[in-house]
């Protein structure tokens, strides 16, 4: 309540202050849009954001090497509200560039240890009973540069390979049942992409039967081409590479396939030189998106510290926030809805006194897992990893109000 009272007091002072002798012209002088006829229905058939929001867009990181058509674009987390990522701002990760595939010519083959191998058209799939669920997707390399203590400037680049959408499609379990898969011996599913990389990933049968979706819809419309149009696999809770885009084939088997992307990439290099494989789960993680790196606090007073938390194992149970580098913590407010394997928005009121501060957030999920500090993670994983960094992120607030990325052990 003290924070709320401070906010109201600050707001009152702001309203009482007069920018000029005659008051604020933005209030006193009637603007043109209040005196004239507005624009007609938009000529273009697909709505666009305001021109005043044109700076909020996906961006490529200047610190990543672009190889051929392989590319990454990052979601501007610092400018989003709630938990849903707009389709046009969903992050991208391509292994051989993207294609806009004709859905009338696209096919999905289900084969392997099934009684009735089938080939589905998009019309076949979309006639089946569908489900819609909200889930986050995070690239396994999200926050990867922080392993090497590379302080990239903004939350868009530290955590921007992360999005959350409502996905619509047919449960994978329904397709497996339709093809009569062998429940006694089936252990894994191989998912294959139709892109030039021929990306393939192994999915455990338990996960396939749980909540995996063969999806064509995202946020109420068809998938965007860069996000797998016309068909992609949705595997809630696991790293994004397993959400195979432009899905063309599913093969049922009794052993993992150990494909290229499973033995050479998306593996964790341990301190002793060994590799952890099939570490697909995205563990509990959180990040403050405002205030965050690249932003500036303009004056002392009340601020709403807000961010996102998520866990590949289920719901977020609690998020704690510290403004002194982890010495003291306060429990943040979780904004509804709080869904399983989805982003959860958290907020905490904070009155900045004008001095230096270090902002952190720490997530705890329903399994009891607590997001680790970076030194705790490095004690187990070393410093040569690329993937699966879920350490606590720190933002340093200088007495000038400038916010920057800093690592606190």
Image (tube, grey):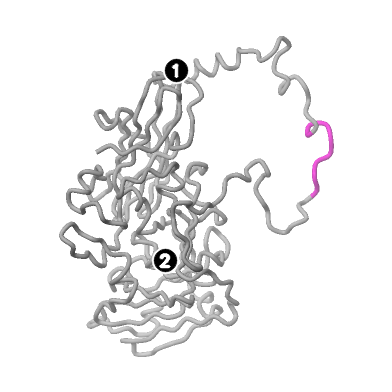
Question: Which of the image's four quarters has the C terminus?
Answer: top left
Magenta segment boundaries in residue numbering: 33-40
In depth, the one of 196 and 125 nearer the eye is: 196
Residue located at (58% from left, 82% from top):
105
Spatial CA distance of label 2 from label 1 is 45 Å
x%, y% of residue 395? 37, 35
Front-lying residue, 35 or 157: 157
Q: Residue at x 52, y 42 (%)?
A: 79
Magenta span includes 330: no
Secondary structure at badge 2 equals: strand
**Image disc number at residue 377:** none
Extreme residue toward the right, this view: 36
**Callout 1: SS:** helix
- List x then y, in percent, for residue 160: 44, 50
Magenta-drawn stretch, dominant element (helix, strand or loop): loop
Count residues near mark 2 (Cα–Cα under 10 Å), then give few for <14, some for 14-19, many for 20+: many
Q: Residue at x 55, y 13 (%)?
A: 13
Which quarter of the picture shows residue 349?
top left
Instruction: Name the residue carrying label 2.
Output: 234
Q: Establish if 172 lies above or below 311.
A: below
Q: Which residue is mark 1?
A: 5
Picture coordinates of residue 258, whole percent (x, y): 28, 76
Are circles 2 and 1 on residues that touch, CB within 8 Å? no
- Asked whether, in this view, residue 4 is left or right of residue 259, the answer is right
Q: Quadrant of the N terminus?
A: top left
Q: Where 254 sits versus 228, above or below?
A: below
The 10 Å Cα crowd at callout 1, few under 14, some 14 to 19, many 20 or more, is few
Tell me where residue 61 appears, x and y as whole percent: 47, 52
Q: Quadrant of residue 205?
A: bottom left
- In this rendering, is residue 303 above or below 9? below
Residue 39 is one of the magenta-drawn residues: yes
Residue lying farthest to the left in this orientation = 272
């Amino acid at each position: 309540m003290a924070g709320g009272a401070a906010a109201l007091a600050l707001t009152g002072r702001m309203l009482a202050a007069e920018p000029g002798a005659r008051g604020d012209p933005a209030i006193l002088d009637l603007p043109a849009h209040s005196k004239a006829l507005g624009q007609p229905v938009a000529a273009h058939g697909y709505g666009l954001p305001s021109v005043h929001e044109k700076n909020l867009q996906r961006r490529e990181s200047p610190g990543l090497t672009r190889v051929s058509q392989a590319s990454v674009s990052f979601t501007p987390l610092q400018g989003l509200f709630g938990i849903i990522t707009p389709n046009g701002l969903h992050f991208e990760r391509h292994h051989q560039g993207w294609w806009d595939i004709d859905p009338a010519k696209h096919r999905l083959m289900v084969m392997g240890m099934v009684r009735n191998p089938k080939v589905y058209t998009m019309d076949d799939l979309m006639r089946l009973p569908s489900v819609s669920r909200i889930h986050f997707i995070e690239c396994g390399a999200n926050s990867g540069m922080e392993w090497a203590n590379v302080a990239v400037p903004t939350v868009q680049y530290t955590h921007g390979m992360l999005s959350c959408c409502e996905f619509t499609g047919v449960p994978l379990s329904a397709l497996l049942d339709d093809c009569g898969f062998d429940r006694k011996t089936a252990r894994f599913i191989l998912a294959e992409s139709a892109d030039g990389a021929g990306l393939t990933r192994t999915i455990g049968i338990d996960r396939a039967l749980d909540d995996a979706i063969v999806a064509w819809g995202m946020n109420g419309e068809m998938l965007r081409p860069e996000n797998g149009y016309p068909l992609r696999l949705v595997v809630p809770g696991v790293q994004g590479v397993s959400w195979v885009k432009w899905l063309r084939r599913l093969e049922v088997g009794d052993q993992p396939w150990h494909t290229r992307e499973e033995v050479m990439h998306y593996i964790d290099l341990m301190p002793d030189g060994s590799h952890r494989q099939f570490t697909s789960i995205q563990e509990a993680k959180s990040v403050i998106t405002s205030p965050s790196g690249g932003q500036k606090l303009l004056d002392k007073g009340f601020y709403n510290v807000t961010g996102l938390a998520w866990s590949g194992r289920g719901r977020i149970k609690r998020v704690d926030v510290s403004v002194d580098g982890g010495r003291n913590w306060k429990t943040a407010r979780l904004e509804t809805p709080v869904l399983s394997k989805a982003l959860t928005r958290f907020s905490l009121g904070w009155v900045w006194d004008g001095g230096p501060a270090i902002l952190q957030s720490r997530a705890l999920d329903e399994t009891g897992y607590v997001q680790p500090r970076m030194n705790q993670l490095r004690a187990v994983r070393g410093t040569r990893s690329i993937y699966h960094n879920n350490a606590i992120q720190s933002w340093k607030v200088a007495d000038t109000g400038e916010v920057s990325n800093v690592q606190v052990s």
